[in-house]
Amino acid sequence: MNASRAALLYGGTLCLLYALLPSLSFPNPPLDVVEGFAWGREFQLGYTKHPPMQAWLLELSYHLTGGYAYGAYWLSAISIGIGYWFIWLIGKELGFSEQQRFWAIVLTSVTFYFTLPVPEFNPNILQIPVWAGMIYFFLRALNSGAARYWILLGALAAIGFYTKYFVFLLIGTIGLYTLVYADGRRYLATSGPWICSVSFLLLVAPHLYWLYETDFLTFRYAIGRSNAAGSLFDHVYNPVNFLLAQVANHAGLLMVALLGLSWQKLKTAKTSWSFSRGSVPTLEADRFLIWFAFVPLFVVLLASAVTGNEFKHMWGTPLFVLSGLVAVRYFHLPAFWSAPKRAFAGAVGIQVLFLGILLGQAVLEPFWKTKQSRIHYPGKATAEVLSDVWKKETGTELAYVAGDEWTTANVTLHAPSRPSMFLEHNAKLSPWIDLDDVQKKGMMILWRGENSAPAGQILELYPNAVLQGQQTLPFHSYGTFPDLTINWIIVLPGSVATSVDEELAD
């Protein structure tokens, strides 16, 4: 089998498995997926935590699957698959052989971000094809000068902006490369970069207007949730911690690279830079690869060191789409190996391990875990109970649910009427809410646990509210999870309190 077919078979099989396994075994979607479905039901130009692309795609999958949530797992698999495709194309454009590109995909696939986190379709996963695609279109634009690649770069950058603002890191990396190196500067006097910028601005204009209209809701939420430096020590600890986490996330890649070696090969191999450079013919290709593999990471580390802020480890997801190509290039693979079959067996073994962990989380965790798990949350059963209670009480379909995000988002996803999520009963956190319509249709206030009343702003709005109903549901059909206690108050039409204006909740 030639390398291109092997890459297609390997990458396609992985994507299929990472889509099928959670589709068949996860009783309830993970946190980010449930939240995304709740947002997507509203079809807004932006949401509390993120730009809208993830939520839009989830809502589309909901309708394409006839109202099921498993479309999220296929969206993740498709994102990973497109990422592999762009990695293959980048390798081709840089002069890698087909065999080298195959191994680049294999090595990329065993980095952590391409394994265990895949079923949780969120903006981090969606950034993988965006970043890989932007790097490819920029490379093609540099090599060919064709206007279509500049336009595609601008359009994909806009999709990245609608996915997560972290894409500005890559946009800045591209812009800086264009200014620093002659092969980029030569296009500044042409229409290419300018039509790229225009296509980007035209596409992001609606979201920019939404940000203005909502007083930059997503930015303010991010600032409110960020972990600022507590001491000078954080200026050192946080960047080092982030870097070490990213090294650990490459443990699978390093393991596979080592498995292909033999002691005899190590003794006889040359160790000069000329040997380790591999077979890519041009210095420009080296420069491009190193720039986009390491400059974004360096900027993140520098920003963390200067500000002392903590960067979440998962934010590193799109930073390493070139890791496999870098490993092939500078470890001189597969030429440096004497046992490539053993290396491939190691990669397959790592994938089996992670797929086994996912299956174990879904099937075995209820036998031993005593802390409730999101993927075992009885979302559908809870939504059906609450919908029935509301309909018996009011004779209408449930239209609005207020409370914390996890509790309300599950009802929004699973209830037949798909009620709108009135997050924390706060109109600022829920800009899609029409308060007049809520007053007209009424609302259900929800919370979990043994507390006799909801907490926070809801209690302030309804100081005399009394618990009206409580239901205990098994958290899973078998195992050791403690039961779920769901509480509710029915707010009849005309009785909804006015949501107070306040700063975003921490």
Image: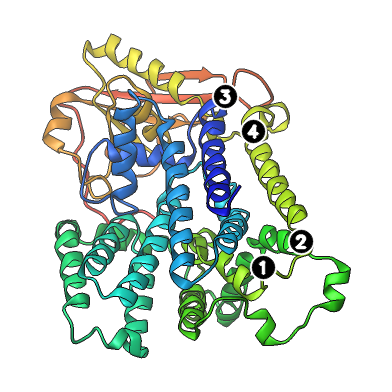
Task: Give the amino acid at mark 4.
Answer: Leu
Label located before the other in sequence (2 or 3): 2
- Label 2 – label 3 distance at C-alpha: 45 Å
Give percent across and percent down for residue 409. Answer: 37, 35
Q: Nearer the viewer, mark 2 or mark 3?
A: 2
Q: Nearer the viewer, mark 3 or mark 1?
A: 1
Q: Residue at x 37, y 33 (%)?
A: 408
Give percent across and percent down for residue 148. Answer: 22, 65
Residue 475 marker: 3
Task: Give the amino acid at mark 3.
Answer: Phe
Is residue 463 visible to the viewer in this orientation of the structure? no
Residue 260 marker: 2
Residue 333 marker: 1
Label located before the other in sequence (3 or 4): 4
- Label 3 – label 4 distance at C-alpha: 18 Å
Q: Residue at x 33, y 17 (%)?
A: 387
The answer to which of 477 and 275 lies nearer the viewer is 275
Label located before the other in sequence (3 or 1): 1
Residue underneath mark 4: 359
